[in-house]
Image: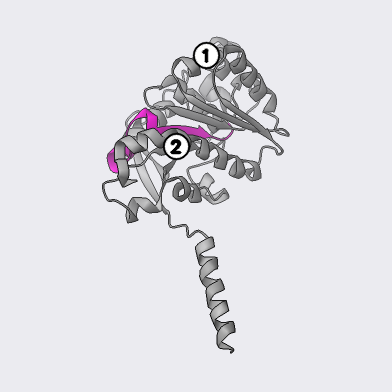
Amino acid sequence: MNPVRAFCLLLMSVLMLIASPVWAFQTRVVAIPSVAMHRSFDATVVLPDRYARGNASARFPVVYVLHGSGGSYTDWTANSQIGKLADRYHVILVMPDGGHQSWYIDSPVDPRSRYETYVGSEVVGYIDLHFRTIATRQARAITGLSMGGFGALRIALDRPDEFGAAGSISGAVDPRGCEDEPGIERVFGDPLKDAQFWNDEAIVASAQDFGREHIALTIDCGVNDALVQSNRLLHERLVELGVPHDYAERPGGHTWDYWSNAVKYQVLFFAGGFRQAVHAANGAAT
């Protein structure tokens, strides 16, 4: 081969390697015990490349990402490329198991279903104990899809000392419109007899608390999603109350194509809010 041509091919190969990011995040599955429910549940933890290769004392912000109804802790990594976001934004991603139809609440009718306590307190405590996290609300965010979108907002509202930011993707933000969802009455109770609980749990009923607790908020739903109207109503209520938040509607429905794209914007939103906490925790080390 012509030496000049060989050199050009080598140069092109090097440039392609430089231009194409190498994703070196680590994915682990850990069993996280629940005292509240007397058992352990698996969770997926994605660590950014810098966690292993960078400063051994550096600490990282955490984004908790919840699955939807009928899903599990494997959903996000199986159906999206969410792991790349750990490397891109230097965050730890945690995807806990929230049961099939738990709605991430502490059920008033089923004492065995304590998923808000589990995800909002027990999982957070375990992750902070076993990984190099920045264990402050300013470096901790929670989001999720569908049922997980509701759960993320509900947990953040009920635990503002734990989470400084929250998001929802295609969120079932008002359970009162989901009475036909299989299994929902097993955790919420009867929609007539227990109507007050259903009303209180609707995110719109607590919308003002996002502003009062200074929770950074981002909401995203597809224009072809059956849940878009309840998301619009929540957005309108937040605007009416003067609560700062990001709101987006994009083409798409209740699908992984939509969710795997939307989560990129949500983690970007959270990462922007983490900067001050990261600098305070690590200084020039990051």
Q: Residue at x 37, y 26 (%)?
A: 162
| Residue 176: x %, y % from top left | 62, 18
> Which class describes the residues within 10 Å of circle 2: few (<14), some (14-19), or many (20+)?
many
Q: Residue extending furthest left?
A: 57
Q: In the picture provided, is 8 more to the left or to the right than 255?
A: left
Query: Does dot 1 land on a helix, a strand or a loop?
Result: helix
| Residue 38 visible in this rendered orientation of the protein | no
What is the distance, in whole Å, between disc 1 and disc 2 at their CAs? 23 Å
On the image, numbered disc 1 is attached to which residue?
208
- Type of the residue with mark 1: Gln
Q: Residue at x 58, y 29 (%)?
A: 219
Q: Earlier in the sequence, mark 1 or mark 2?
A: 2
Magenta segment includes 256? no
Q: In the image, which disc is placed on residue 112?
A: none
- Type of the residue with mark 2: Tyr
Query: Does dot 2 land on a helix, a strand or a loop?
Result: strand
Q: Quadrant of residue 68?
A: top right
| Residue 13 visible in this rendered orientation of the protein | yes
| Residue 183: x %, y % from top left | 57, 28
The one of 116 and 223 positioned closer to us in this rendering:
223
| Residue 225: x %, y % from top left | 70, 33
The stretch of residues the image draws in magenta is 126-146
Q: Is residue 156 above or below residue 237?
A: below
| Residue 174: x %, y % from top left | 60, 21
Q: Is residue 199 above or below residue 84?
A: above
Q: Is residue 158 above or below residue 11?
A: above
Q: Residue at x 29, y 42 (%)?
A: 130
Q: In the picture provided, is 200 more to the left or to the right than 115?
A: right
Quadrant in which the N terminus appears? bottom right
On the image, numbered disc 2 is attached to which residue?
64
Q: Residue at x 53, y 45 (%)?
A: 76
> Which class describes the residues within 10 Å of circle 1: few (<14), some (14-19), or many (20+)?
some
